[in-house]
Amino acid sequence: MPPTGDGATLFRNVRIFDGQNEELSEPSNVLVDGNIIATISDQPIETNDSDVTIVEGDGRVLMPGLIDAHWHAMLIRNTPAQTIYGDVGYNNITAADEATDTLMRGFTTVRDVGGPAFGLKQAIDEGIVAGPRIYPSGAMITITSGHGDFRQLSELPRTIGGHMARMEQVGGAMVADSPDEVRMRAREQLMQGASQIKLTAGGGVSSPFSPVDVSTFTLEELRAAVEAADNWGTYVTAHAFTPQAIRRSIDAGVKVIEHGFLMDEATAQYIADRDIWLSMQPLPEAMRLGFPEGSVQREGADKVFPGIDNAYQLAKRHNIKTAWGTDVLFSQALAQQQGAILASLIRWYTPAEALTMATSTNAELLALSGARNPYPGKLGVVEQGALADLLLVDGNPLENLELVADPSNFLIIMKDGVIYKNETPE
C-alpha cells in the first residue's frame, strides 16, 4: 500500500504562501488530516488526537510543494547510450534514486514529457520508492529523423511493419510516419496510463538528426494524436521551437506548446488569441556548454538558447498562460540545480510570480489531463481541502527566491500528508 498521512499533522505559527497571493498570510495554523489540508486558521487549532504530529513553525513560511512541468524522470542519470542500449533494470534503479532526490529537492510533482516512467510512477504510488507524483506521457512520439529519433544510421532503412528499434522497445520514443501510426502509438501510451500525449512537432537540440529549423509532423498526423487524446479526455503537448511548428500544432488542436524559443511577435499573438499554454524552461548556460564544440547538438543549442530571453519577453507582453519546467536530460549534476533553475526566473519575474508559476499555475496545466488525471484533488495551493503537498521554508522565498535553490532551506517536505523530511529544530 502507498504511504498515506494516516494520522494528522499540525503546523503552528506559520506564514503561508498559498501559491496564488503575492503576500504572506498573518501567523496561522494549518491542520493536515490524512492527505488533505483540513483546517487553516489564525486562531489556535485544538486537537484531541494524541497521534497528531506537532510542527512548530516559529513564523517560518509554509508553501505548496514545487511542480516541474517539463521533466524526464527516466532520462536524467544515464548517458543516451546507456538509456537506450543499457540494462533496463539498472536504468530503473538509477531513475528511482533520482526520483527520491527530486522529492528531497522540494519537488512533490513532475509532469514527465517523454520516457518509460510508468513503472517508476507505480513504484512511487505504491510506496516502494520515495519520489514525486508523476504525470506520465510515456514514450514521446516522433517521426523518422525527428527530435527523439535516437536510432543510428546503421538501423536504416526501416522495414515497414518490421521490428522495433531498441529505443522503441524500451519505451523511450516511438516513430510514427502516418496518421494511422500516430493514432496507434498515442493509444498505446494511453493504454499504459499516460495522462497526456507528447509529440515532437519540430526539430530539437539533443537528438542527432533533427535540425532545429525543421517542422516534422504533418497537420493530419498531429490531428490524429489530438483526436486520440481527446477521445480519452486529455490533451496533446508538442515540442516546437519555430513559428511554423508552433502554428501547425495549434491548428491541429494541440493545447500546450513546449519551449517556443524561436517564436516571433505574430506567433506569440497567435498563441495568446487561441488561449494556448506555453510550457517554457529557463535553460541554464551549462546545458548549452555541455554539448561538445562542433557537434550537431551544440550547433542547435547555439541557435536556440539566444531565443530564450525573447520568448519570455513575448510571453509576458502577450499575457500568455506560461508554465515552468527544467527539461534536464542526461545530467545528474544539472538535475541537482533544479531549484536553481527555478530561481533563475528572477530575470523576468518577481519571486511571487515565479513561485506561483511553479505551484498553482503548473497545477492548472496538470488539470488539463481531465479524466486521465492520476491524482484527483487540488494541487499547488495551500487551502482547505487541497492535497497536502507542503514545504516549510527557513526564510521568506517571496523576498529571496534563491532560497529554493538550496534544498537545505526546506526544513519539512511533505507529500500526500506524509513527512519525508523533518529538520525543524528540537
Image: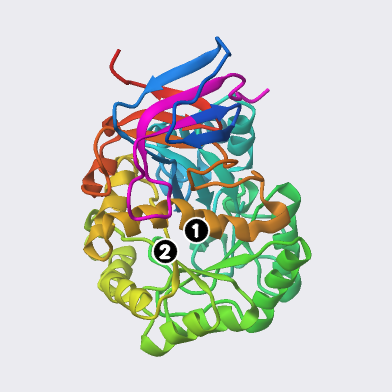
Q: Which amino acid does label 2 sit on?
A: Pro
In the image, is residue 111 above or below residue 29? below
Pointer 1 with pointer 2, Cβ within 8 A: yes
Position of the C terminus by quadrant: top left
Horizontal relation, residue 112 to residue 338: left or right:
right
Query: Mark 2 highlights which residue?
Result: 208
Q: Hey, which residue is sitting farthest front in the picture?
A: 43
* Image: magenta residue range: 1-30
For the residues labelled 1 and 2, the Cα–Cα distance comes to: 7 Å
Q: How many marks?
A: 2
Q: Residue pushed farthest top? A: 50
Q: Position of residue 232 (x, y in %)?
A: 76, 60
Q: In this view, does 394 lie to the left or right of 30?
A: left
Q: In this view, does 255 lie to the left or right of 425?
A: right
Q: What element carries label 1?
A: loop
Q: x%, y% of residue 198?
A: 58, 62
In the rendered structure, which disc, 1 or 2, sits on the residue that comes first in sequence?
Answer: 1
The residue nearer to you, when weighing 21 against 391, is 21
Answer with the quarter of the image where residue 82 lies.
Answer: top left
- For the residue carrying disc 2, how many other residues have a C-alpha within 10 Å: few (<14), some (14-19), or many (20+)? some
Task: Tell me, yes or no, if residue 163 can be seen here.
Answer: no
Quadrant (top left/top right/bottom left/bottom right) for the N terminus: top right
Q: In this view, does 156 lie above or below 316?
A: above
Residue wearing tag 1: 150
Q: Which amino acid does label 1 sit on?
A: Phe
Q: Residue drawn 70% across and 53% down?
A: 372
- Look at the image and say whether residue 17 sits in the magenta stretch: yes
